[in-house]
Image (spheres, rainbow, N blue to C red):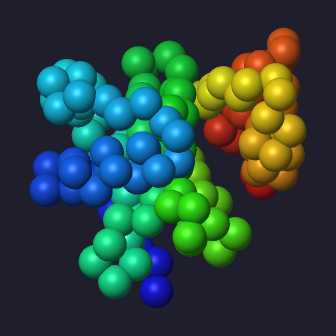
Amino acid sequence: MIGVRQFRWPDYDAVAELWNSAGRDVLSRHELETKLLRNPQLFLVAEADDTVVGVVLGTYDGRRGWILRLAVDPTHRRHGIATRLIGELEQRFTALGCPRVNLLVLPEDDGALRFWQALGYLPFPDILCSKPMDTPR
């Protein structure tokens, strides 16, 4: 069973390894410490049998939310983990009163663009996807 919860510091090495395996840059501990001063509840991990299998980092500046660094372990993809992480993150954005969430998608990443569009995010203008938080999936 997959569980989604807030990041804890003992997760850092597993999260860094996951970002590496998914081809993402790894944020340093210092960079994460700075980020977590603002909204620690927006940094989520997905676990299966006490193993981190997914991660997403959200930020909210009081005006807009951002989704950053979504990654799922390649051996656990296509099981709805990314969708669950984003669903939980969206609930947390809503609880904070966040009116809109943005993210960046590389224009050549058709799979990512299809994933985000299936969740209700719309391209605007070329690589930015955006979703008002009062819009149901």
Q: Residue at x 35, y 65 (%)?
A: 52
Evaluate whether residue 40 shows in this view.
yes
Image coordinates for residue 80, horizontal then vertical, percent: 65, 69
- The answer to whether 122 appears left or right of 76 in the picture is right
Image coordinates for residue 78, horizontal then vertical, percent: 70, 69
In the displayed structure, 111 sits above or below 102; it is below
Quarter residue 135 falls in: top right
Q: Residue at x 53, y 28 (%)?
A: 66
In the displayed structure, 47 sits above or below 37; it is below
In the foreground, 59 or 46? 46
- The answer to whether 119 appears left or right of 42 in the picture is right
In the displayed structure, 61 sits above or below 45; it is above
Image coordinates for residue 61, horizontal then vertical, percent: 41, 18
- The answer to whether 66 appears left or right of 33 in the picture is right
Residue sitting farthest toward the top: 125
Count of number-bearing discs: 0
In the foreground, 101 or 24? 24
Give the quadrant of the C terminus: bottom right
Image coordinates for residue 16, horizontal then vertical, percent: 31, 45
Q: Residue at x 83, y 51 (%)?
A: 118
